[in-house]
């Protein structure tokens, strides 16, 4: 069975690694994380979002997984609230009771960002 789960969200404006809301993520089933998507947008017509990354860590993996994102610069009224997605395929084990820590880092201080981190999981 393959399903998508929301791993975390973030409205952080920090330029240092900051825990996402919902972190650590607790897997619903044993399985494999096969893809991570970061959907990002601004919550205002004047939102600013530049590059950064989302980092996922789990004791089962041995190394951290990074999903870099480029951002979209300054949003203006005609552009509206378009959502952009950064994604990365992977093949990482998940086990119930073994948490996944998720942090975000912005390279430039953002203005009114919102990020949703989703994972495709094969159980």
Image: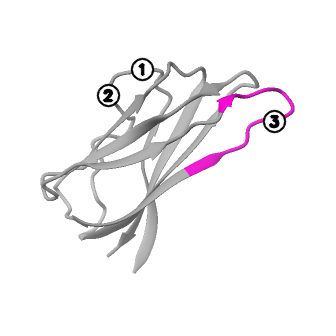
Q: Position of residue 113 (x, y in %)?
A: 57, 29
Q: Is residue 69 left or right of residue 42?
A: left
Asked if disc 1 and disc 2 are in contact, CB closer than 8 Å, the reply is yes
First of labels 1, 3 by sequence position: 1
Residue drawn at (28%, 68%) of the image: 29
- Magenta stretch in the rendered image: 73-85
Which secondary structure type mostly characterizes the magenta part of the structure? loop
Q: Position of residue 34 (x, y in %)?
A: 36, 68
Protein image colouring: one colour
Q: Position of residue 32 (x, y in %)?
A: 29, 70
Question: Which corner quadrant holds the C terminus?
Answer: bottom left
**Vertical relation: 89 (above or below) 14:** below
Q: Residues within 10 Å of mark 2 (few under 14, many from 20)?
A: some
Q: Position of residue 120 (x, y in %)?
A: 42, 66
Residue pointed to by mark 2: 17
Residue drawn at (67%, 24%) of the image: 47
Label 1 SS? loop
Residue pointed to by mark 3: 79
Q: Which residue occupies the foreground of this view, 15 or 7?
A: 15
Q: Residues within 10 Å of mark 3 (few under 14, many from 20)?
A: few
Q: Residues within 10 Å of mark 1 (few under 14, many from 20)?
A: some
What is the distance, in whole Å, between disc 1 and disc 2 at their CAs?
7 Å
Residue pointed to by mark 1: 14
Q: Is residue 94 left or right of residue 104?
A: left
**Vertical relation: 23 (above or below) 5:** above
What is the distance, in whole Å, between disc 1 and disc 3 at their CAs?
25 Å
Residue 68 position by quadrant? top left
């Amino acid at each position: 069975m393959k399903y998508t789960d929301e791993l975390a969200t973030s409205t952080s404006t920090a330029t240092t690694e900051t825990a996402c809301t919902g972190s650590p993520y607790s897997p619903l089933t044993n399985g494999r994380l096969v893809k991570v998507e970061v959907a990002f947008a601004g919550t205002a017509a004047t939102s600013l979002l530049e590059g950064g990354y989302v980092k996922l860590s789990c004791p089962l993996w041995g190394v951290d997984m990074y999903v870099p994102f480029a951002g979209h610069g300054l949003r203006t009224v005609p552009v509206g609230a378009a959502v952009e997605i950064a994604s990365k395929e992977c093949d990482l084990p998940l086990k119930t009771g073994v948490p996944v820590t998720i942090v975000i880092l912005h390279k430039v201080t953002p203005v009114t960002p919102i990020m949703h981190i989703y994972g495709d999981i094969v159980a």
